[in-house]
Image: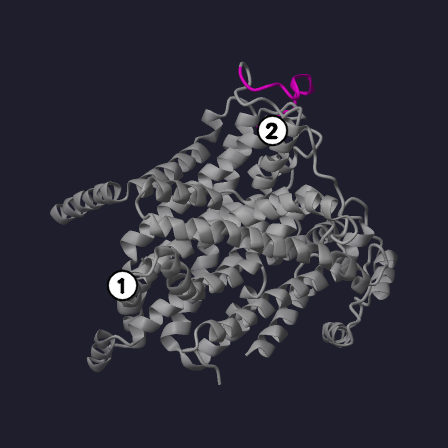
Amino acid sequence: MTFPVLLGVTLLTFFVMRVMPGDAATAIVTAGGQGVAREGDLARVRAELGLDKPLHVQYGEWIWGLARLDLGRSWHSGRPIVEEIKLRFPVTFELAVLTALTSVLIAIPVGVISALRRDTLTDHVARVVSVFGLTLPSFWTGTLILFFLVTWFNWFPPMGFVGPFEDPVANIQQIMWPALAVGYYLSAYLARMTRATMLEVMRQDYIRTAWSKGLRERVIVVRHAMKNMLLPVVTLAGIQVAVALEGSVVAESIFMLPGMGLALVSAIQERDYPVIQTFMLLLAIVVMSVNLLVDITYGWLDPRIRYN
Amino acid sequence: MPVSAASTRSGMVASLLRFCKRKPLGAIGGLGVALMVVVALAAPIIAPYDPYAMDYGAALTTPGGQYLLGTDNFGRDVFSRIVYGARISLYVSLLAIALGTGTGAVLGVVSGYVGGRADIIIQRSLVDVVMAFPTLVLALGMVSVLGPSVENVIIAIATVQMPRSARIVRSAAISVRECEYVTAAKALGAGSLRIVFLHVVPNCIAPYIVYATAALGAAVIVEASLSFLGVGSPPPTPSWGGMLAGVGREYMEAAPWMALYPGVALSLAVFGFNLLGDSLRDVLDPRLR
């Protein structure tokens, strides 16, 4: 089932980049619409980029290249795209992991406490905080974070990126703010889901049995309720990987973090189509792999579900 | 018939009042959305200045006095730009959602009711493929090729919204298809079109409206994100996302109002759509509660 979708994803990416109106060669020759395109320049650029070949040949060459992990070169820098990805992917990967961690660390305690203390002040405060998170897209939270850092501490997080193994302190200073901005936004959905599921679970018969056995609340919550609450929460967390990726595309631009997102945005500004095309495909593949992983995790979390 | 017309009108008012009473938060959300619509429609009356007019002499004026929310680095009135920004935001999200979820709904009904090969083709070749992309990434790619303009942003948002509404309407259509009253209608000799319009479509409307309202809030965010990244409505169009991006690090200390007020407007708009969507879901679609 995944393979045809993967094929469709490559076709759609290719279609968006090549078949839609808006010719890449004209854009390059005229530098984004400013200059005038001469026919000779156009033909030269088209030949250089292989755009004069029939579409199915272009598509075939791209796919054949992908199969051999030859992703082509950037039109802008002339460097192999593989090199670019090796440089950028670790940044986005670390950001995505920290984002997911932030989101879960906020959402699960908030959701669980909110459900256990239903309709008390704690619950209301927690719900308002999480509904508020839904209205704060990452670029807006990011701007707010920068604003408070600069007005309260007169400090901007250092730009660029230092690897976590070179200088962990600088690394965390750079990456925690975008992770917080995106993670808070994600935690809003996750906390709502956690609360709803927890309420559902706490009504089950086996929870009543656990209470009547005289177990302590902590044991009931951790050992009996939370285990059964995980399934829908894991599903949502998986779906959120896609949202986390788009959040980091934007957050990287605010915090000048040189990951895939920042590279994608500058590739778009430079009309560097091979880079855009490859990055779009790569991000789609990451989302699909996570969805597959979530499906597999189901079977592990809930032994009643079996795959053939 | 005047009598029945009057009774439906009072019926609508009564059900509206009942909604406000049962869902005060939803009513607040609805009020916020209505306010945004009014501001967008009456922008030329509300805005004290031309949102495009630059006045370098008045650049970076602090809020208060002559300029309610201050001016930006080009001396443009921030309040007027926010008011006109409501127009852009609403125009883009309404059209994009109408186009995207409308197409999605048609595909969903066909997919769910007809089923079989049509279902497989629509789901595998279209819905699954589009859904594999992070929405913003696909929208970014499309706008980068089409070129930044309000219309292209609408097309991009419509495309990324389409599969989700198709999924939701499809599952509603499938559940109707198996109902006994549909079998009964078939037994009475009703044609496919009659069944679709009389039985399937009415049952899909509630989940569709719930989804479309929530999607409006999401569309507002995607529009703002695209403008923020510089590929949405091209400057100097007053878009909330673009206004936030214009601040950058250099004006963050000197003129934070340039970013903070458009951001607040954005949050209020999304908050309104979310509250309304949540309450509509509780009222219209008991299955999702």
Identify which residue is drawn at 62% across, 73% down: A6
Answer whether residue B28 is visible to the viewer in this image: yes
The image shows a total of numbered marks equal to 2
Quadrant location of the N terminus of chain A in the rendered image: bottom right
The image quadrant that residue A204 belongs to is bottom left
Q: Chain of mark 1?
A: A
Q: Chain of mark 2?
A: B
Residue in front for this viewpoint, A119 or B187: A119
Identify which residue is drawn at 42% across, 81% down: B116
Q: Nearer the viewer, mark 2 or mark 1?
A: 1
Does residue A260 appear to the left or right of A124 in the view shown? right
The answer for how far apart the CA atoms under marks 2 and 1 are is 55 Å
The image quadrant that residue B81 belongs to is top right
Query: How is the protein colored in the picture?
Result: one colour
Residue A168 in percent (x, y) is at 73, 49
Residue in front for this viewpoint, A94 or B3: A94
Residue B170 in percent (x, y) is at 39, 69
Does residue A92 appear to the left or right of A241 in the view shown? right
Residues rendered magenta in the picture: B51-64
At label 1, which amino acid type do we have?
A: Arg
Q: Residue furthest bottom?
A: A308
Question: Element at badge 2?
Answer: helix
Q: Within 10 angstroms of label 2, few (less than 14), some, or many (20 or more) residues?
A: many
Per the image, the residue denoted by label 2 is B258
Q: Which mark is residue A208?
A: 1
Does the magenta portion include B191? no
